[in-house]
């Protein structure tokens, strides 16, 4: 992970501030930094989103392609995640330097989506055992300013909300061979329901308290963090402890309660932003990186 | 040949442009706060981001340090979702490595590397959406990023692609025009002196036509220079307003 070098005095300053519920930029322990979300940023994709959380900048593109269903789930489509930690974020990610972090994030994404309710995979099936939609979710990490997992999960949810999969019909002719017909209207598409798509809330343990949405400096002061993936209804789909320190069991329960509380608020604000952006329609002025 | 007509009888191209017309260019400097210099450019539907780190100490082996000038290190990466067909690997394949070397050659000609001996300048270019002219967009974005980082250069480096169809030279090719298989020329120019930093051409072209295609590319590069100059001045004006001068 991109890290910043902090002196002991700076660490003490941050730790003491957190004990008093006051962080360096004035937030309280459960406040997020201001988040900018924009969808439909890249046009070669079926859906895309860009999330800017403080200095963390993530771009996600979703491409829908036709493939064969997996053997153990013949009537479902599936999602494939790929995370590219680009050298833009820090020169250490040049060449293969960013592969380790990329694989770690991709594996976490696989785990949080590895349940029946997050995404309706049956709607991605075209004809059982033969054709299905495969959604390739590609995450591009452009700038690293702390709290990567949260930003990436918000971007993935926004990109899946924005994804438009063309409607197809399977035609069977007399010999029994199947033909797939794409609908003529380019706007005729199916949308995914992202009601149950989880978001990750990362809680970093600093001293005796835990903080939500840590900056790079705060992450350098924390020895252990808990990643909790929460849906909009407050259901926890995955939990993971990261970091080289240790956590005691009571703090884990406290952190889980915080994450459920914070997660629900995060989901409601994200949903309202996405619906507001969608209601502006095709005449919405696209800003992208130019604004 | 039936099919797509790259240049109509009235002189219009597939997207409605004239032969020597550039696509709409929009650019912004200082996109990322944590990098030393960064820039973003949109040339039609091609979007490219460039980030510069440096000059800083040589990473990796010290033996690569040059005693009298800085080392310029470039990486070209294109996002997996940038092209119509999904790319499996963003960088590390042959085309990306070759583009990285070409970018390095281009910028070694323009950056005043003698001012920073034994150090390294990293230029990382990311293509977000590829619709033809990716090399040119990368060079233009990288020029703005190097200027944003405050690294002294001899001159702007402005690049443009050009092609040749039915006796007319076309400037700034889009993906459709590149895929049609005609000759393509990529040119990187230092506008003030008219010196060429990089010249690359694919496919067969009769030498009688070469001058025309080269002139079309050079004129397009000079037009790009006018735009980039305007973007830089605008950025400096905004920065000085914020500083309160």
Image (tube, grey):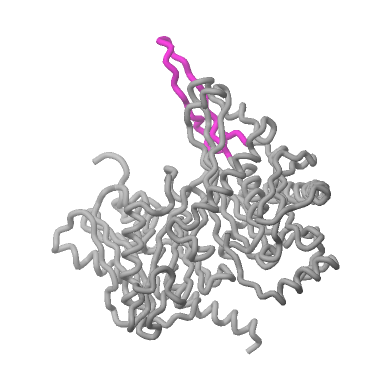
- Going by the picture, which residue comes out furthest to the right? A20
Q: Is residue A215 left or right of residue B172?
A: right
Residue located 59% across and 56% down the image: A58
Task: Estimate the x, y position of residue B111 in percent, counting from the top left.
Answer: 37, 79
**Is A49 drawn above or below residue B108 in the view shown?**
above
Based on the displayed image, in which of its 4 quarters is residue A212 positioned?
bottom right
Query: Can residue A279 be seen in this snapshot?
Result: no
Q: Out of A248 and A82, give the one closest to the viewer.
A: A248
Quadrant housing the N terminus of chain A: bottom right
Q: Magenta stretch?
A: A164-191
Query: Can residue B31 be seen in this snapshot?
Result: yes
Based on the displayed image, in which of its 4 quarters is residue A20 positioned?
bottom right
Q: Out of B184 and A134, give the one closest to the viewer.
A: A134
Q: Is residue A8 left or right of residue B215?
A: right
Residue located 44% across and 63% down the image: B125
- Going by the picture, which residue comes out furthest to the bottom? B245
Residue A264: in magenta span: no
Residue located 79% across and 60% down the image: A31
Task: Estimate the x, y position of residue A194 in percent, counting from the top left.
Answer: 68, 39
Task: Estimate the x, y position of residue B41 in percent, counting from the top left.
Answer: 48, 65
**Is B231 drawn above or below residue A65 in the view shown?**
below
Q: Out of A90 and B90, give the one closest to the viewer.
A: A90
Quadrant housing the C terminus of chain A: bottom right
Q: Out of A253 and A147, give the one closest to the viewer.
A: A253
Task: Estimate the x, y position of residue B209 in percent, counting from the top left.
Answer: 17, 62
Q: How many marks?
A: 0
Residue located 56% across and 29% down the image: A77
- Going by the picture, which residue comes out furthest to the top? A174
**Is B178 drawn above or below residue A207 in the view shown?**
above
Based on the displayed image, in which of its 4 quarters is residue A94 positioned?
bottom left
Residue A167: in magenta span: yes
């Amino acid at each position: 992970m991109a890290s910043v070098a902090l002196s002991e005095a700076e660490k003490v300053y941050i730790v003491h501030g957190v004990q008093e519920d006051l962080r360096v930029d004035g937030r309280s322990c459960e406040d997020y930094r201001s988040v900018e979300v924009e969808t439909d940023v890249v046009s070669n994709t079926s859906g895309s989103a860009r999330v800017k959380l403080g200095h963390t900048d993530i771009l996600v593109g979703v491409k829908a392609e036709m493939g064969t269903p997996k053997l153990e789930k013949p009537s479902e489509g599936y999602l494939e995640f790929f995370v590219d930690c680009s050298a833009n974020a820090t020169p250490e990610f040049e060449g293969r330097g960013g592969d380790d972090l990329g694989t770690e994030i991709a594996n976490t994404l696989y785990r949080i989506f590895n349940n029946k309710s997050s995404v309706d995979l049956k709607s991605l099936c075209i004809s059982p055992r033969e054709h299905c939609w495969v959604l390739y979710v590609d995450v591009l990490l452009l700038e690293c300013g702390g709290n990567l997992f949260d930003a990436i999960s918000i971007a993935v949810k926004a990109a899946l909300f924005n994804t438009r999969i063309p409607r197809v019909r399977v035609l069977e002719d007399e010999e029994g061979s199947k033909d797939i017909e794409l609908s003529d209207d380019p706007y005729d598409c199916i949308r995914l329901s992202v009601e149950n798509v989880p978001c990750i809330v990362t809680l970093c343990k600093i001293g005796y308290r835990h903080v939500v949405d840590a900056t790079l400096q705060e992450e350098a002061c924390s020895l252990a963090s808990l990643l909790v993936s929460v849906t909009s209804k407050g259901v926890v789909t995955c939990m993971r402890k990261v970091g080289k320190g240790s956590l005691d069991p009571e703090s884990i329960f406290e952190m889980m309660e915080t994450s459920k509380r914070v997660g629900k608020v995060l989901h409601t604000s994200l949903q309202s932003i996405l619906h507001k952006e969608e209601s502006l329609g095709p005449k919405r002025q696209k800003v992208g990186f130019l604004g | 040949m039936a099919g797509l007509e790259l240049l109509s009888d009235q002189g219009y191209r597939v997207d409605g442009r004239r032969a020597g017309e550039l696509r709409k260019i929009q650019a912004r400097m200082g996109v990322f706060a944590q990098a030393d210099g960064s820039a973003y450019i949109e040339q039609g539907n091609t979007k490219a981001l460039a980030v510069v780190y440096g000059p800083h100490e040589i990473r990796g082996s010290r033996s690569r340090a040059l005693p009298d000038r800085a080392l310029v290190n470039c990486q070209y990466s294109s996002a997996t979702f940038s092209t119509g067909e999904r790319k499996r690997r963003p960088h590390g394949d042959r085309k990306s490595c070759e583009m990285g070397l070409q970018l390095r050659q281009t910028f070694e000609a323009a950056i005043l590397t003698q001012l920073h001996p034994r150090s390294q300048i990293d230029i990382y270019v990311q293509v977000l959406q590829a619709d033809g002219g990716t090399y040119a967009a990368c060079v233009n974005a990288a020029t703005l990023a190097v200027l944003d980082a405050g690294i002294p250069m001899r001159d702007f480096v402005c690049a443009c692609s050009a092609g040749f169809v039915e006796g007319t030279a076309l400037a700034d090719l889009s993906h459709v025009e590149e895929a049609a298989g005609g000759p393509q020329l990529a040119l990187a120019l230092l506008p003030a002196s008219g010196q060429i930093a990089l010249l690359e051409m694919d496919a067969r072209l009769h030498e009688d036509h070469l001058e025309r295609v080269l002139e079309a590319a050079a004129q397009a590069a000079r037009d790009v220079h006018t735009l980039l100059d305007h973007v830089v001045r605008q950025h400096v004006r905004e920065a000085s307003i914020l500083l309160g001068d």
